[in-house]
Each structure stands twice: as C-alpha cells, then as structure tokens.
Image (cartoon, rainbow, N blue to C red):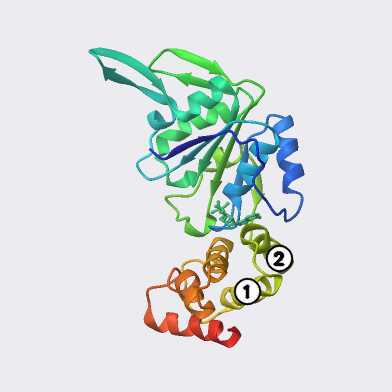
Amino acid sequence: MDTRVTQTADIPFYQSAGNEIELFELAWKNRLPLIIKGPTGVGKTRFVAHMAAKLGLPLYTVACHDDLTAADLVGRHLIGDGQTVWCDGPLTRAVREGGICYLDEVVEARKDTTVVIHPLADDRRILPIDRTGETLHAPDNFMLVMSYNPGYQNFMKGLKPSTRQRFVTLRFDFPSAAAEEAILVGETACEPMLAKQLVSIARSLRALKDVDLEEAASTRLLVYAARLIGVGMDPVDACRAALVESLTDEPEVVEALMEVITATF
Ligand code: ADP
C-alpha cells in the first residue's frame, strides 16, 4: 500500500490562497476533522504537508485506491516465524501515536472504510479494532484529514452525506494569477516573466470552451513546464510535454491546445 509517514523539521513551501491556514488551525485546535475538495494538482497535499510541519505533527499519508479496505487502514495479523503478529495500519498508528492521518482521494477507497472513519470523525473520536478487541480513543493531537476531487466523482463514488456531515470542508480551486505565479517562482525559482507567461497559458487553456478535456491544466503541470524550461528545454517543447500531452490523447485537441502555446512562445 502507498503510505508515507513524514516528520519534517523544514516547513514545505505553500502559497496560501485565502483563510485556509487559519481554518485548518481552528479545526485542529477544536479537534474537528477536515475534508479538502478540489481538482487535481492545486496544492491539497502540499497544504496538508505544510500544516503538519507547521504544527510539528507527524503526517501519515495514505493514497487511497479502489482496493483499499478498512483492514489496510486499521491493520491486520501477519504470520511470521510460525507466529501471528498484529501489525497496525497507518490510521491506527496515527491514533496511537498522535498526528495527522491524511486519506488522499478517499472516494476511491472501498465503502467498508466508512465503518472506521465514522466513529473517529464524530465526537466519539474512537477507533474500534474488531480483530484485537481494542477500542482506541484518539488523543487530542490526532486529526483526520481527507481529500477528494469532485470532478471525478460519479454517483457511485460520491461521499455519503453521513460521511460528509462529520467534517468541516475546505474547497480548493485554481489559484489566482498572482498566486499561481508566486507558486511557480517559489517552487522552481524561475524568472517572474516566465511564470507570468505560463500562468497566462494555463488560464487560456482552462478557458477553452470547445475543447473536451477531462481535467483542466493543473498548477502541478505548470511547475513541470517551468522545471523543464529551467534546465534549458525549448519552451514550446516543454509545454507540449508537460501541459498538452498530459491533458489529452486526441490529436485534434493537441493541435488546439498547441495553438495557445505557440501564440505565447
Ligand atoms: P493535489 O494534492 O491538490 O493534487 P499537490 O498538493 O500535490 O496537489 O500539488 C501539486 C504540485 O503543485 C505541488 O507539488 C507543488 O509543486 C505545486 N503546488 C500547487 N499548489 C501549490 C501551493 N499553493 N503552494 C505551493 N506549491 C503548490
């Protein structure tokens, strides 16, 4: 399973867009769980990493996928040396040791995960572990954070109201032009002029009405383009690789998107 545990002394760079830092801190202080919803690549994961480091908390990140079960989060018995040993999953570790458990793209996970999320996300703040007979009480320094992309959601995969209504919810969207330029300069140390050009391209791509794209160009892809240009790649080639081919497989759509690029570079 793709799980990361991080404890960083350095606070990862995060360009704020509004009152989200204050809201996160208030949720944290008041032991409220948090959902962050928004399109891919607009800083949800970076924001959580930034806040965990700022608050001095370990961060348990779980990249959810469609096979992820409650047992993957809670833990399971493993057999080794002829013995059965209980092994905590990332959610259980975060509850035992304190910290932030971040379930990225939670709508992908199997529905049985709600059984463990619900009692942790309301005022009970407990994690019952059926297989060991334990009931863990989350310490004050435990916080549950989940993210999802409403764009991908279909009827079957949406979060149930009974889950949503246990969380405080933050909406993330594409940053303003000034904020996105600051992100590019902060992430890649590129020239402000290049940041301006790339952000202007992204905004034109996002505004294209007649082009059928599953998702609009993300800030992540702009960061990639700036990095490629920064190491000497031709800007048109860099934008084709990072911004255009990553968005579509359709040759006609590639052509339409490339027109926006060549109008700038
Ligand atoms: P998400 O979790 O929303 O899919 P990420 O947090 O992984 O997106 O962001 C993708 C990349 O875009 C980051 O690695 C970072 O380079 C950049 N990024 C996007 N938004 C921000 C931001 N507000 N501050 C700093 N970097 C950002």
Which residue in the structure is indicated by mark 2?
176
Quadrant including the C terminus: bottom right
Q: Amino acid at mark 2?
A: Ser
- Check disc 2: other Cα within 10 Å, few if <14, some if 14-19, many if 20+: few
Against 165, residue 83 (above or below) is above
Mark number displayed over residue 203:
1
Under circle 1, the secondary element is helix
Q: Amino acid at mark 1?
A: Arg
- Ligand 1 rendered quadrant: bottom right
Side of 152 relative to 43 (left or right): left
Residue 209 lies in what quarter of the image? bottom right
Classify residue 101 by image quadrant: top right
Q: Residue at x 64, y 47 (%)?
A: 47
- 254 lies left or right of 183: left
Choose between 187 and 244: the one closer to the eye: 187
What x and y, as percent, mark residue 196? 68, 73
Between 71 and 154, the one lying in front of the other is 71
Q: Is residue 72 above or below residue 130?
A: below
- 133 to the left or right of 79: right
Residue 32, given in percent of the width and then of the height, sits at 67, 33
Q: Picture coordinates of residue 245 (x, y %)?
A: 42, 72
Residue drawn at x 48%, y 69% is 242
Q: CA distance from mark 1 to mark 2?
A: 10 Å
Location of residue 159 in the rendering, given as x and y in whole percent from the top left corner:
51, 45
| Residue in front for this viewpoint, 257 or 125 | 257
Labels 1 & 2 near each other (Cβ < 8 A): no
Q: Secondary structure at mark 2?
A: loop
Q: Residue furthest front?
A: 232
